[in-house]
Image (cartoon, rainbow, N blue to C red):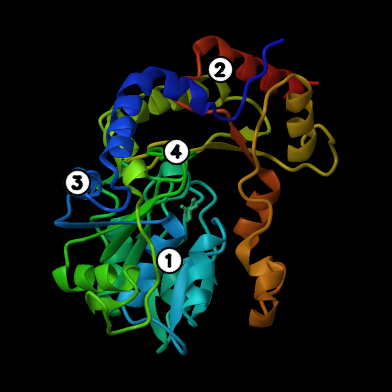
């Protein structure tokens, strides 16, 4: 039996191998491996794609978040609101700059932070909110921006999983003060290694991020603040320039696959498919279903379903098994189990199914058949 992986990047490479070889060969032959026209071209074109005036490449999505927080002067004594259910990097960077992450629960239907709960988490120390557009779907940015404006809080969008997603016709990453992107290979626009970018329409913030990512230098060999070394490599930029041209097509293919999952899995008892909000367009970095947890019936257990699918050669992923407020890293913040019931329940129920542009209909049918079979035993 053919195995179905959660993602297969070699398929995508085959499609663009010639263009990538040409672009990479050109960089290698030039003898210039840091900065240069490939990086400039990518920053310009990606900024245009997102709809911002300023785009700055950096080493990773994690660095992008770090640069954003530093540029907004967020540090010790400050609080930053983040969802309790996301990849650790979102909260980790808040701690890395010396500030305190303040967790809020998520909505069961979108997996995204519950905007109503953001309001009650605001204190006199709050400086910013980091909405995470999880699994490819935008947070309700209309409501979030209204709260941020009322309370004079900065908004840093974590767009790592949502390159190309929109809210109310605008791309995520141009709605808040700063957008943070990751080009980790599994993201919708993935490099062949690490990469990231920050986007903004604020020139002063952009200038600060440029300085901090380059050792805090205000001019060559004059450092004004403590910075880091965070660069988007020339080789990665050359590859991303090729891939950016395919991004909309790949996102459309993901969307097609998601629609088929909706149609064919939407009515399976015990399974909940992800909901797409009408004002936004998800780019489906993950297609995450919930296997309802029934303690009386062992079939209805995410881990059992996952193991049975694995036996049939179907790889699934669990994003994320432990909510952030229960990570041992954050023991000192004194959160308790039960405090964010939705995040805690979903961490036991979520299962991300194979979704990538090259997934064939036959492969998808195998996944669908296997899930239905597992849940009807
Ligand atoms: C991938 C990811 C990041 C971090 O990006 P890296 O490029 O791996 O550093 C941050 N936030 C979220 C939600 C992510 O999925």
Q: CA distance from mark 3 to mark 4?
A: 19 Å
Q: At 48% from the left edge and 73% from the top edge, which residue is drawn?
A: 94
Q: What is the C-alpha distance between the residues marked 2 and 3?
A: 40 Å
Where is residue 206? Give x, y as percent: 21, 67
- Residue depth check, mark 2 versus mark 3: number of the one nearer the observer: 3
What's the CA distance linking mark 1 and mark 2?
Answer: 36 Å
Query: Which residue is at the front of the view, 193 or 296?
Result: 193
Q: Residues within 10 Å of mark 4 (few under 14, many from 20)?
A: some
Measured as percent of width and height from the top left, residue 221 is found at 26, 78
| SS class, disc 3 | helix
Which numbered dot is residue 279? none
Residue 52 lies in what quarter of the image?
bottom left
Q: Residue at x 37, y 42 (%)?
A: 277
Given this view, does label 2 or label 4 mark the residue nearer the observer?
4
- The local secondary structure at tag 1 comes to helix
Residue that carries the numbered disc 4 in the rendered image = 192
Mark 1 to mark 3 CA distance (whole Å): 45 Å
- The residue mark sitting in front, 1 or 2, is 2
Identify the disc placed on residue 37.
3
CB under 8 Å between discs 2 and 4:
no
Instruction: Give the residue number, with chain letter if any, for mark 2.
Output: 364
- Provide residue 261's location: percent of width, then percent of height: 52, 24
Q: Quadrant of the N terminus?
A: top right
The residue beneath circle 1 is: 116
- Provide residue 272's location: percent of width, then percent of height: 59, 36
Element at label 4: loop
Picture residue at 41% right of the left edge, 68% below the top: 66
In the image, is the residue at mark 3 within 8 Å of ligand 1 by its beta carbon? no
Secondary structure type for disc 2: helix
**Residue 15 in the image: above or below residue 102:** above
Between circles 3 and 4, the one closer to the viewer is 3
């Amino acid at each position: 039996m053919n195995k179905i992986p959660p993602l297969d990047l070699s398929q995508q490479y085959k499609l663009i191998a010639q263009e990538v070889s040409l672009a990479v060969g050109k960089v290698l032959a030039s003898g210039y491996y840091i900065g240069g026209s490939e990086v400039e071209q990518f920053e310009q074109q990606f900024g245009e794609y997102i709809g911002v005036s300023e785009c700055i490449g950096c080493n990773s999505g994690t660095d992008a978040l770090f640069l954003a927080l530093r540029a907004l002067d967020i540090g010790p004594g400050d609080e930053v609101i983040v969802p309790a259910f996301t990849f650790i990097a979102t909260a980790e960077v808040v701690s890395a700059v010396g500030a305190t992450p303040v967790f809020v629960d998520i909505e069961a239907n979108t997996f995204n932070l519950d905007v109503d709960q953001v309001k009650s988490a605001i204190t006199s120390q709050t400086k910013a909110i980091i909405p995470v557009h999880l699994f490819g779907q935008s947070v309700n940015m209309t409501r979030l921006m209204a709260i941020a404006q009322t309370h004079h809080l900065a908004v840093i969008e974590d767009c790592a999983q949502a390159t190309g997603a929109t809210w109310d016709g605008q791309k995520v990453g141009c709605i808040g003060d700063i957008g943070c992107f990751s080009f980790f290979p599994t993201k919708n626009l993935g490099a062949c290694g690490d990469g990231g970018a920050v986007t903004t329409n604020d020139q002063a913030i952009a200038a600060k991020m440029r300085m901090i990512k380059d050792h805090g230098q205000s001019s060559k060999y004059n450092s004004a603040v403590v910075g880091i070394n965070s660069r988007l490599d020339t080789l990665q930029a050359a590859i991303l320039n090729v891939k950016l041209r395919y991004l909309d097509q790949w996102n459309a293919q993901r969307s097609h696959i998601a629609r088929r999952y909706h149609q064919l899995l939407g009515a399976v008892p015990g399974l909940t498919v992800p909901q797409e909000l009408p004002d936004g367009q998800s780019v489906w970095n993950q297609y995450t279903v919930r296997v309802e947890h029934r303690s009386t019936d062992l079939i209805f257990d995410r881990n059992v379903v996952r193991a049975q699918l694995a036996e049939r050669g179907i790889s699934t992923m669990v994003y994320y098994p432990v909510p952030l407020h229960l990570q041992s890293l954050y023991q000192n913040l004194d959160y308790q189990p039960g405090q964010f019931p939705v995040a805690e329940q979903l961490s036991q129920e979520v299962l991300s199914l194979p979704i990538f542009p090259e997934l064939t209909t036959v492969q998808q049918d195998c996944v669908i058949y296997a899930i239905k079979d597992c849940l009807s035993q």
